[in-house]
Image (tube, grey):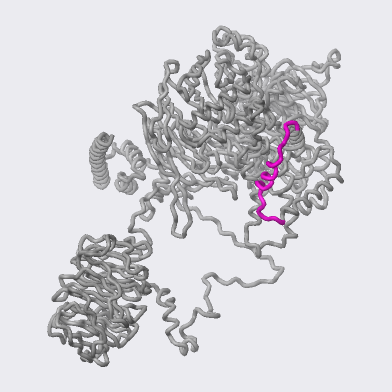
């Protein structure tokens, strides 16, 4: 515990605002120590007592979908420029510079998922601060980390060659070909005297020369000690350490000073040169003996002080000196990164302004690449095998941008989940909640993107961003002074069950001069173009007041939208259709009704599963409305729960309503109108999410003991004792359920997606769909480098990118869930036109079929088999093509005739799980029936038969799942009274099945 | 990532009726010309043939007007008493008119000579009409409750119908069957006569008809659709549709006028119906729905209304002796594309190639410049049009906030754009910069914009915010420029007005709430 804190203090300044990664990465490790303290207070709480054996200490399985922070370390390129290494937390990701795919990960990050905690691994345990190519061997990578280790990797084979433990957090690392055995490192030195207010003032560092030769005594160990460590000198906490190209000079930059030492006479120590402002970055000219620094005021300084005379003239060592400098000033804010081009003619600089400035050193003229979409963190210059120069910018939203040096245009952009750049560049507290929703038509998550006013659609199964949506288009203008520009911010998203409508709420807070701007925007999904288009904009839906809730009704044909605002009103919005002049129908949203209850503030709104009841939580009251007439059905209030923050229906029958307060969970039985059970939790409830099908509820608490941990209790509607209690090493800002059910499971698990307070997107729950992204762990890329380096005639003709996919396919098995409604849109569009305009069907056949059919190959399949199977499929489809418009229901109908026995079904399910997708086959996906090809129809057919139980199984009463779903089908869509009878029978039946 | 131009928000505008396509069309009938007569104008009739001259009957004369000049070309005044119902024959060569002595005269339109005199009615003749299909027949309806059909060459009545029991004040020969005559009388009935049988074949309305079609007020006007299957009649303020095929069933009754409807007219293709009434209104109906699509207001009770067959003129005669003529400038395309004209214009001309440019290989001049066809293997360099930024966007891109604001405050820039730019400046934290350091000349447009739009619900709030900022920044220099001072005063007045208005609205809302609440109590 103490060690962690010391580490934290030491690193506090170097990674200035970005402390969150360290926290996240450290928590799993420190959990072991902290777990006991954790349970301590929980035990005191009386209600918690009986839950301990349920496994409070067990972490709910979770996995991270995003990198959660942007790297501050400039990417390092391989010598041929075809791969680059990006340091992300405690791991190094190897990207292909052609298509930006992660091909391998060294020192897999322990923060990536709950599973990684147990795999000890040989990676770094703390944030990696430096990574360089070994000067001796260009196929080796040397990394240094805050855990005090220097590691040497063979990145081709992804092998760890050597680990040298220094025992002190390493801040920087550099090496030079002249010193084969040695590296220079800057280590943080724990101060001798700690200040009263913690260690934040303690920013001393020391520069050491470390021999890579292990001490003979430790040569056999996995963690070796260095045979020779020479201290060069003491500095403040460094923000740059570099050796001059000739290897003659060692320069460290820290605080307001540049520290220069001559490598030939390290004994004499550093000579200090003072800058008027605190320095932030360092770059050496590639050929000449001078270096450039950037400072917090935006000045770039070129230092011409690497001269023996200047150093010598100073008699006393360690005295501060002035040196001849040149100042280049354009940046208004701190310079975050500097880089010289390879020929040394230009200097590149970037910062918060999101502008790459290219200084022509000879003349001092500048060129700009403006609007690179996010603040620039890092700049790297590389040269491809074709000897084309390019600049790779690492941006604050964790994406990379490639700028062609010739045209100064952005040519490529690589991104995974983009992060909020205003958060990662620091200085701003994360908002209280983050918008998050699942869109089923594109099987993607809608998340906030790099700017708070924009959203991104991320497909977890495809691991890529499908689209970006500017909710309120804005130019990314950086602040003028210190005052931060208030962006408009997307506060919440709601997506209708059909996936056709999306509602977003964006808000720009007002200040003393200007009023708040708040817009409710409704977007329509265009399935053909696979894009959202703005349908209706509603200015100030609740006047000046804030809007708390935006939620669609579950009605699939004509959803209603409900908003509740701080003005005390609840509004229902509805679509209206307008027929235009030319007969085109135009749908838009209008306010349908508006109501309020006494003078209470509505806090939360939700719908019953069939859409017949609207539940609004008004403080102490929970009011059930009829959505069409807006009449009050009944008012629920209980002395147990003085202020209900939300109310949720459990399950699909709408019998149980969970009312959640700050500490309390109440389950109302709506049929008897009595409280089923009540539970007062010892910790405050942060979020609650009901299961989409099952009558269970997950309640998230912020653990009181730890800052970044939370616990989850899963409750069933029938019992006040939790089904299970799990812990999580983070806190959640928002959460949504993610549909991915293993089809055969008896008890339906939770699968959720959330955004943590550290702005990490995580998937968590009982069942996580396996992530098939190849490169989350270390993989050999040796073979690929050969593939990449050999240029064939075809590559010259068709371009290289045409072939990279193929080479990737070999290593990362493509799951067949990559064929989607999404992808199919393209192909259907191809056939839309009039038939006489289409090319002959023979010419289209292959490409069209290739689009529809995703060859699903077991990994052991050999080449000739592959050909065979493909032939088979094509024949199969050929038959189908003769029946245009044949849809899946035909096949489903024929299947329903046959009674499937249970064993058979299980067998198929197992088979299906093994060979095919694990993507959730949502009921909607089935209805769509988007695939025409034979193979997919078969798989769908099986799933459908699971969901459509035969009556004979219900008699047996051994199958809770089918029973329930059949009853769900009989529940009438409206009326509370009818619901009573049906759900009562449901209850009986469950009892029977339990007995 | 490119520069994103300022998004000008579209604000919702309530769609008013005056902006529908239909009413736009009828609004094209502009510039009413008022011609004063000595007595009420009782009848206006357009010649069915070009140049669509129209006969206006008022007092003891019938005047023929030329539509182009809107001047009287002929005046026929050979009546001993008040003339009635001047009507021009299909070919535009003859005019027939009755008078209050019961005399019917047929004139040559050019020489104004009396060609025939039809004299057998004993009472005033209010309706004289040429049969549209049989050129030599004239229909007359008289106050002696008889309806006669005359043969003009022989000056003798062919048939006389005696079935009406009161004045017959309206009538028409069917345009689809020359033997059918539709009349409406003050005995409250509409009758359909057949000249072949000489009998009344159908009685519509009347006090003893079935409930749906009972009519107790005098029938003022009847009109028959060109197809001859549906008839319209007006009695008092009520207009009825009669289905002649279904035996004279009343299919619809409309009451859109406040007072008696005196006249009915179809437009050229009988897709719209015009009705004029004593309530000073002329209403236009869409005959497919019988909804009023447009309303025209006149200064006096309308006695007769007519629209020219080419839909360029609407003439209405009023009880105070005013004739109002509204005209519309037909579009160039309309006159050419008249299919009837092309068909009737004779084969000879068409063979000469003069009148048929639309058929066959007519050369159509394309507006785009023709591109020279190059060689097959020639490379063409496409000139890509760069999207030009607007001036304020260009300035904003260069962070020249003040200049951008100036360019958005120009006269020709709509306020939506100006406020969109102001909002963008607020978002960039640059409005203070843009507003600062202005002298009275530069401040004037800002204040003008604010005072003009401070009560516009689309920008009111933002205008208030900006105004308070301006006041905060420039209150120190007030009193130095009379122009600026007066603008500030105007702004204050505008705000005060708006506040007063809001207060009134709140009062009204409170009153309404009270009424609604008490109504709710009553119903419960």
Q: Quadrant of the N terminus of chain A?
A: top right
Q: Position of residue B98 (x, y in %)?
A: 19, 82
Q: Which residues are magenta?
A: A882-903
- Residue B438's place in the image compared with B225, above or below, is above
- Taking the magenta stretch, the answer to whether it contains residue A161 is no
B459 displayed left or right of B161? right
- Taking the magenta stretch, the answer to whether it contains residue A893 is yes
User: Does residue B480 appear anywhere in the picture?
Assistant: no
Q: Residue at x 36, y 31 (%)?
A: A596
Q: Residue at x 66, y 42 (%)?
A: A402
Q: Position of residue B336 (x, y in %)?
A: 43, 77
Q: Position of residue B405 (x, y in %)?
A: 40, 47
Residue toward you, B314 or B381: B314
Q: Position of residue A390 (x, y in %)?
A: 69, 43
Q: Furthest-top residue in view?
A: A44
User: Does residue B495 appear anywhere in the picture?
Assistant: yes
B336 displayed left or right of A190? left
Residue toward you, A825 or B344: B344
Splitting the image into 4 quarters, where does residue B131 fall? Answer: bottom left
């Amino acid at each position: 515990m103490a060690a962690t804190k010391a580490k934290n203090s030491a690193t506090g300044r170097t990674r200035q605002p970005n402390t969150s990664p360290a926290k996240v990465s450290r928590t799993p490790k420190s959990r072991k120590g902290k777990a006991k303290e954790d349970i301590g207070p929980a035990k005191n709480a009386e209600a918690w007592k009986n839950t301990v054996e349920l496994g409070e200490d067990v972490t709910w399985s979770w996995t991270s979908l995003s990198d959660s922070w942007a790297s501050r370390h400039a990417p390092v390129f391989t010598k041929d420029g075809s791969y680059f290494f990006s340091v992300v937390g405690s791991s190094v990701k190897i990207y292909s510079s052609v298509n930006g795919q992660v091909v391998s990960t060294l020192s897999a990050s322990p923060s990536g998922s709950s599973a990684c905690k147990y795999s000890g691994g040989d990676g770094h345990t703390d944030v990696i601060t430096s990574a360089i190519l070994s000067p001796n061997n260009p196929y080796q990578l040397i990394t240094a980390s805050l855990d005090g280790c220097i590691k040497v990797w063979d990145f081709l084979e992804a092998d760890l060659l050597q680990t040298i433990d220094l025992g002190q957090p390493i801040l920087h690392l550099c090496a030079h070909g002249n010193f084969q055995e040695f590296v220079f490192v800057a280590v943080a030195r724990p101060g001798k005297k700690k200040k009263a207010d913690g260690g934040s003032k303690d920013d001393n560092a020391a520069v050491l020369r470390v021999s890579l030769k292990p001490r003979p005594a430790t040569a056999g160990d996995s963690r070796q000690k260095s045979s020779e460590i020479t201290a060069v000198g003491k500095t403040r906490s460094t923000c740059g350490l570099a050796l001059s190209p000739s290897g003659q000079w060692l320069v460290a930059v820290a605080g307001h000073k540049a520290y220069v030492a001559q490598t030939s006479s390290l004994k004499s120590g550093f000579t200090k040169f003072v800058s008027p402002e605190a320095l932030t970055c360092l770059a050496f000219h590639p050929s000449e003996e001078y270096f450039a620094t950037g400072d917090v005021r935006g000045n770039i300084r070129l230092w011409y002080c690497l001269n023996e005379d200047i150093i010598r003239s100073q008699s006393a060592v360690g005295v501060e000196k002035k040196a001849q400098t040149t100042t280049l000033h354009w940046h208004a804010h701190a310079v975050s990164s500097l880089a010289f081009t390879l020929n040394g003619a230009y200097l590149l600089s970037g910062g918060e302004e999101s502008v790459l400035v290219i200084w022509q050193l000879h003349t001092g003229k500048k060129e700009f690449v403006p609007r690179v979409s996010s603040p620039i963190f890092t700049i790297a210059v590389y040269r491809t095998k074709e000897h084309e120069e390019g600049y790779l910018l690492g941006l604050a939203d964790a994406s990379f941008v490639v700028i062609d040096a010739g045209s100064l245009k952005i040519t490529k952009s690589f991104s995974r989940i983009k992060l909020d750049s205003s958060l990662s560049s620091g200085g701003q507290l994360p908002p209280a909640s983050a918008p998050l929703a699942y869109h089923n038509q594109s099987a993607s998550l809608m998340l906030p993107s790099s700017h708070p006013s924009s959203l991104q659609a991320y497909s977890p199964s495809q691991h890529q961003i499908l689209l970006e949506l500017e909710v309120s288009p804005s130019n990314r203008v950086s602040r003028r002074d210190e005052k931060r520009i208030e962006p408009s911010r997307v506060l919440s998203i709601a997506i209708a069950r059909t996936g056709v409508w999306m509602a977003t709420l964006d808000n720009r807070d007002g200040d003393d001069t200007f009023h708040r701007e708040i817009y409710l925007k409704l977007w329509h999904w265009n399935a053909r173009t696979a894009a959202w288009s703005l349908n209706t904009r509603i200015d100030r839906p609740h006047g000046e007041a804030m809007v708390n809730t935006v939620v669609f009704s579950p009605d699939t044909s004509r959803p209603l939208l409900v908003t509740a605002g701080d003005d005390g009103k609840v509004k229902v919005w509805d679509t209206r259709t307008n027929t235009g002049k030319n007969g085109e129908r135009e749908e838009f949203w209008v306010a349908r009704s508006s109501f309020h209850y006494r003078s209470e503030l509505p806090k939360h709104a939700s719908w019953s599963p069939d859409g017949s009841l609207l539940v609004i939580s008004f403080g102490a009251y929970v009011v059930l409305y009829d959505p069409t007439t807006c009449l009050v059905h009944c008012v629920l209030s209980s002395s147990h729960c003085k202020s209900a923050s939300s109310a949720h229906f459990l399950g699909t029958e709408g019998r149980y309503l969970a009312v959640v307060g700050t500490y309390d969970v109440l389950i109302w039985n709506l049929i008897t109108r009595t409280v089923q059970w009540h539970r007062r939790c010892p910790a405050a409830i942060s979020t609650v999410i009901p299961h989409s099908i099952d009558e269970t509820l997950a309640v998230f608490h912020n653990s009181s003991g730890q800052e970044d941990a939370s616990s989850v209790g899963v409750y069933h509607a029938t019992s006040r004792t939790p089904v299970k209690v799990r812990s999580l090493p983070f806190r959640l800002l928002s959460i949504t359920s993610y549909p991915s059910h293993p089809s055969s499971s008896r008890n339906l698990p939770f699968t959720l997606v959330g955004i943590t307070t550290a702005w990490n997107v995580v998937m968590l729950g009982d069942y996580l769909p396996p992530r098939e992204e190849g490169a989350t762990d270390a993989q050999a890329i040796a073979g690929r480098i050969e593939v990449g380096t050999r240029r064939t005639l075809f590559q010259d003709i068709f371009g290289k990118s045409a072939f990279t996919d193929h080479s990737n396919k070999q290593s990362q098995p493509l799951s067949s869930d990559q064929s989607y409604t999404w992808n199919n849109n393209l192909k259907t569009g191809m056939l839309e036109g009039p038939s006489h305009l289409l090319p002959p069907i023979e010419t289209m056949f292959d490409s069209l079929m290739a689009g529809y059919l995703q060859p699903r190959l077991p990994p052991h399949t050999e080449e000739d088999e592959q050909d065979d199977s493909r032939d088979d499929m094509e024949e199969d489809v050929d038959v189908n093509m003769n029946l245009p418009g044949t849809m899946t229901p035909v096949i489903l109908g024929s299947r329903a005739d046959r009674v499937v026995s249970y064993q058979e079904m299980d067998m198929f399910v197992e088979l299906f799980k093994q060979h095919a997708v694990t993507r959730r086959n949502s009921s909607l996906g089935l209805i769509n029936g988007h695939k025409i090809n034979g193979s997919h129809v078969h798989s769908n057919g099986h799933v459908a038969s699971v969901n459509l139980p035969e009556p004979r199984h219900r008699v047996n009463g051994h199958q809770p799942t089918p029973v329930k779903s059949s009853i769900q089908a009989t529940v009438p869509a409206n009326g509370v009274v009818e619901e009573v009878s049906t759900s009562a029978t449901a209850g009986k039946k469950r009892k029977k099945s339990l007995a | 990532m490119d520069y994103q131009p300022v998004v000008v928000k579209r604000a919702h505008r309530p769609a008013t009726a005056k902006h529908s396509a239909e009413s736009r069309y009828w609004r094209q009938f502009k510039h009413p010309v008022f011609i004063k007569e000595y007595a009420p104008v009782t009848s206006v009739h357009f010649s069915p043939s070009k140049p669509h001259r129209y006969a206006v009957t008022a007092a003891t004369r019938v005047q023929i007007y030329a539509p182009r000049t809107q001047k009287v070309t002929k005046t026929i005044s050979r009546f001993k008493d008040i003339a009635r119902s001047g009507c021009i024959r299909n070919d535009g060569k003859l005019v027939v008119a009755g008078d209050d002595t019961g005399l019917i005269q047929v004139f040559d339109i050019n020489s104004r000579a009396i060609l025939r005199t039809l004299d057998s009615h004993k009472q005033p003749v209010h309706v004289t009409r040429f049969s549209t299909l049989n050129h030599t027949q004239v229909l007359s309806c008289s106050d002696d409750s008889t309806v006669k059909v005359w043969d003009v060459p022989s000056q003798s009545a062919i048939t006389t119908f005696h079935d009406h029991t009161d004045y017959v004040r309206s009538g028409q020969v069917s345009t689809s069957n020359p033997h059918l005559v539709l009349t409406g009388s003050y005995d409250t009935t509409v009758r359909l006569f057949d000249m072949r049988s000489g009998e009344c074949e159908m009685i519509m309305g009347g006090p003893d008809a079935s409930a749906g079609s009972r009519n107790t007020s005098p029938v003022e006007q009847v009109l028959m659709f060109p197809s001859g299957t549906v008839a319209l009649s007006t009695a008092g303020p009520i207009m009825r549709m009669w289905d002649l095929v279904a035996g004279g069933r009343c299919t619809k009754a409309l009451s859109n006028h406040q007072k008696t409807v005196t006249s009915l007219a179809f437009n050229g293709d009988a897709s719209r119906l015009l009705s004029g009434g004593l309530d000073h209104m002329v209403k236009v109906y869409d005959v497919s729905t019988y909804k009023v699509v447009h309303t025209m207001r006149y200064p006096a009770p309308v006695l007769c209304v007519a629209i020219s067959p080419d839909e360029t003129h609407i003439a209405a005669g009023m009880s105070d002796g005013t004739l109002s003529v509204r005209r519309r400038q037909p579009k160039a395309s309309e006159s050419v594309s008249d299919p009837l004209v092309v068909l009737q214009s004779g084969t000879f001309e068409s063979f000469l190639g003069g009148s048929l440019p639309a058929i066959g290989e007519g050369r159509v001049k394309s507006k785009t410049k023709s591109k020279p066809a190059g060689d097959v293997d020639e490379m063409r360099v496409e000139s890509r049009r760069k999207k030009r930024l607007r001036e304020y966007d260009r300035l904003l891109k260069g962070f020249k906030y003040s200049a951008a604001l100036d360019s958005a405050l120009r006269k020709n820039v709509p306020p939506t754009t100006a406020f969109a730019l102001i909002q963008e400046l607020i978002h960039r934290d640059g409005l203070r910069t843009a507003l600062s350091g202005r002298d009275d000349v530069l401040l004037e447009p800002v204040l003008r914009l604010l005072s003009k739009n401070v009560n516009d619900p689309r920008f009111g709030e933002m205008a208030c915010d900006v105004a308070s900022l301006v006041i905060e920044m420039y209150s120190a220099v007030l009193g130095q420029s009379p122009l600026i001072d007066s603008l500030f005063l105007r702004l204050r007045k505008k705000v005060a007005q708006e506040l007063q208005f809001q207060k009134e609205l709140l009062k009204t809302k409170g009153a309404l709430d009270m009424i609604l609440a008490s109504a709710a109590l009553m119903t419960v």
